Image: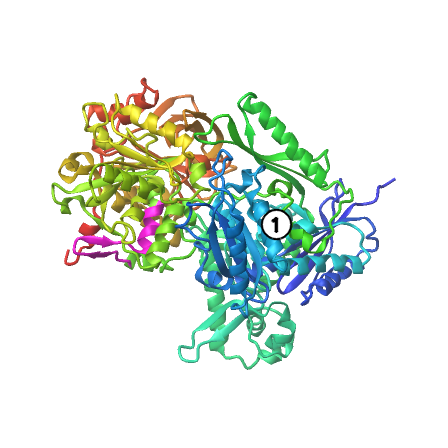
Amino acid sequence: MTSEPVLRLGVDVGGTNTDAVLLNISEGSQRGRVLASAKHLTTPDVTQGIQNAIQDVLNQVPDATNIQAISIGTTHFVNALVERNPTRLDRVAVIRLCGPFTHGTPPFVGFPYDLRNLLEGPCFLVSGGLQIDGSEIASVDTAEIESACEEISRQARFFLRYEIHAVAIISVFAPIDFTLKQEEHVASIVRGKLPHLDVVCSKDVAHIGLLERENASILNASLLRYAKKTVAGFQKAARALHLRCPVFITSNDGTLFNCAQAARLPIRTFSSGPTNSMRGAAFLASLESDISKQSALVVDIGGTTELSISYTPPSIGLGGGSLIRQDSHTKRVTVGPDSVGHRITSEARIFNGSTLTATDIAVAAGRASIGDASLVADLGESVIDGAQRAIRNMLQNTLDAMKTSTMDVPVYPVGGGSILAPDELAGVSRVHRFPHYDVANAVGAAIAQISGTIDSFEDISSTPVSEVRKAVEAKAIARAVAAGADPNRVTIVESEVIPIAYTSGRCRFYVKAAGDWSGNTITDEIEGDDIVSSSQSSEDLGVRQEATSSGAMASNSPAYGSAEDILSFVPKVQGNQWFISEIDLEWIADGCYVLGCGGGGSPLHTFLELREMVRAGEVIRVIDLGSLASEALVGWGGGMGSPEVSSERLLGNEYNEASADLWAFMGITKPDALAALEIGGGNGMINMITAATKNYDIPIIDGDFMGRAYPTWHQTTANVFDETGRGLNLLPSAISSGDGNVMIMTKAKKDTDVDASLRAACVEMGTHVGQASRPLRAKDLGVSMIVNTVSLSWRIGRAIALARKQSNIGQIGQVVVNAVGGSKTAKVLFNGKITDIRRRLHKGHTIGEVVITALSSDDDVEEDPDRPVERFSGTLVIPFKNENLYAEHTANDGRITMLASVPDLISVLDAQNGSALGTPQYKYGLRVLVLGITAAPQWTNTQRGLELGGPSAFGFPNIQYTPLGVYCKPRSVIEEYAAGM
């Protein structure tokens, strides 16, 4: 006797079309079979469009009584952002609980101009926030919150077209605030004063990473009214068809939300379209035996937006409903980004409308048989050819941006708008459309699973980490089962243990479990306005927000759009001074992270603060060391502390305060210039903030005292050339917590005591401080300072930007090698994927090792024959103490070779986008390449330099330092671009 099949309905609600498929998910040979599919126009209220598509599918199947669930994926919310649709987006007020910190990076600092103008409401940076240990930065001031509410109400009267409908509340370290509950307290005050507004607490939206969590909270808040209406429409459609099965919404990671969760967190569906496309395409590809394992790109073209997918999906405004315009003077044809969306059947020319759309062009060109072709017969060839050329260029440019080399790759178009994709594209080996390609998103939705996530800080002081990890994994599985997953099918799909630097006895655990839905009934009703209550934590929703890496520096794109723009860019150098622009800042930031050698912390937040300053008219100047008088004083320093803190408790005034108090102690008004303690990571740029015109209006020296990043203060070249061993070039030194605590150290028995003592105080002062060291005379820096390292970081960042624009990421290793001086100075040590990562804490530093394994034939991708990539075998082990320490290769035959060690620089880059990776970002499965760069002679040409910065300084006395190559002094940007030179 044959059991009844178990069926799953998958629905994709796009801006133009609503697709539906019915899958057989029963065990056996029929599992995964597409039983029926349908495509209908998305209706204005979404309900009717869903009903039409589902009813069409049901009509094709004789018996559909065993439908287990309806899984709906939607691009509605991301479309609203792509189109900047003011009817679907609300202006948002922001209350950030931060005390004296984060003021240099205000809310909306990373938003594109147009979106910022559309969403930005009044913002308040007020008392509150937590330290990493859970103590308060400052208490919530009720009167201050009430005053903010009054101002929000007052300002709302002036936003006539875009009325404020939501308030986002963000507190520093809110995700670990389980006791004080500052966000919840402020939310209750706001609801009492502004009961007509939606309120979003950031801890409900995402986890550690303040700006990322805040941005997500703002976007989420802006969509709440639209989300409630949309999700309610999904439920209404199912009821109208007498379907009593649960309705799910697919989330960004391809797992399922119930309707209440989706209405509360529409942002967690933003990437569900690309995810469903990828999963659906992979599923359909698995049904074709002739599809190889060759890397391919998936292009999802809907009626409104196009999404090109490989590893990191970008979005552009191209779809079937995209508007086509021709300039009356230049005759240039443009496509989108605005779209008629679901109104295509009334507004497109082929449907007797008056708006020219991309679908009209497809019909006029004979690529589609839709509507009445006679209604576009009058279109001139210049419009048809110009539009097709623009569409082709948009696709080719987006695909090129996703490729890792210039080699041709296959492309799989999916989605109803795939008729827009030409059958041939430059850089594409073939354009292949699967059966059911036009409903691939709905297929991806139908096969989605249920997940459970735990992202928490746990006590490891009395229990082994392995046992705590097992307990957390059990909680994640239990959470997935509680959400509806089949307990017999749940597995752990992700499990990370992340030590928190300078914090003993606690560790961060991130675990995700996922499995097929069990079929058990769950509650998924939307309960009016209660859906935005902050009572449900991010852990309940399986929310995680990754910290943004330096690869996202250009979140608000600078003034270049092509490789030609980069090649023609000339930095502003006048009178032997380099005046820093936005573009310079972006390139310096990317270069600093590469020079961080895995440490130093991401420069992202420092970059954003500096960019905001430059946009406000502040001036930042860089000069060469040689332009200073011999007696000129050069101040130096930076931040000390945990990267986990600096990702949440963004910079306040701590470094400025440390500097001012130190200078006052020494009887100095201000030094003549500032220099970076280390060029690697965020400290490579922090002095630019202090030196800018709004603060001390002094120049930055093109140089630093490490040429890289090192974990301790005494590992500086200023200390290398102090033979006393007592840190005389370091002291006096001041540290400031930024919220009232300052300490000055004047004398040390030995140089290592300086860092140890100040670091111990740093823990008590919030685990992140600003530190300023004794200003030094310019005449003494000719030997100790590593010069032109700001220029070096700029050149590295520029090379990475150019490689991205030229689709040359597959050669990023060689690109950076060339930027730092060529093959005599640097080399690609290895490439492969991370297969193991171990971390632990020791005296405040993150210690561990990463194992990278060469790609196997199954993992590898076909390479560009014109740009051959060096092949590697075996494994590479890189131990680290905040920074990478050495690279040891084990060949397949067991031979072990030391490829590089400190003080030479060892950097790990993401092979897919060229971004540097910090040691906290090392993660299993990442494809990476390892770069080695020869250290400056200040480290390698003296015995003391090797003692302070070589292998023995990190507990490896048996490793003999062997230079990687020959040091190449970077060329000064000022020297190269000075007028008349």
User: Residue 810 occupies which quadrant of the picture?
Assistant: top left
Q: Is residue 181 left or right of residue 34?
A: left
Q: Quadrant of residue 819?
A: top left
Query: Which amino acid type corresponds to the residue marked 1 in the rendered image?
Result: Ser
* Residue assigned mark 1: 188
* Rendered position, 865 above or below 301: above
Residue 467 pos. (x, y %): 59, 23
Looking at the image, residue 298 lies above or below residue 682: below
Query: Can you say which quadrant of the picture contains the C terminus?
Result: bottom left
The x, y position of residue 281, in whole percent, is 61, 50
Q: Is any part of residue 485 visible from this angle? A: no
Q: Residue at x 44, y 47 (%)?
A: 404
Left or right side of 818 for 319: right
Q: Which residues are magenta?
A: 569-590
Residue at 74 percent across and 63 percent down: it is 52
Work out whether 934 lies above or below 108.
Answer: above
- Looking at the rendered structure, the secondary structure element under dot 1 is helix
Q: Is residue 111 visible?
A: yes
Quadrant location, the N terminus? top right
Q: What is the crowding at mark 1: few (fewer than 14 residues within 10 Å), some, or many (at least 20)?
A: some
Q: Farthest residue toward the bottom?
A: 378
Measured from the top left, where is residue 380 in percent x and y? 50, 79
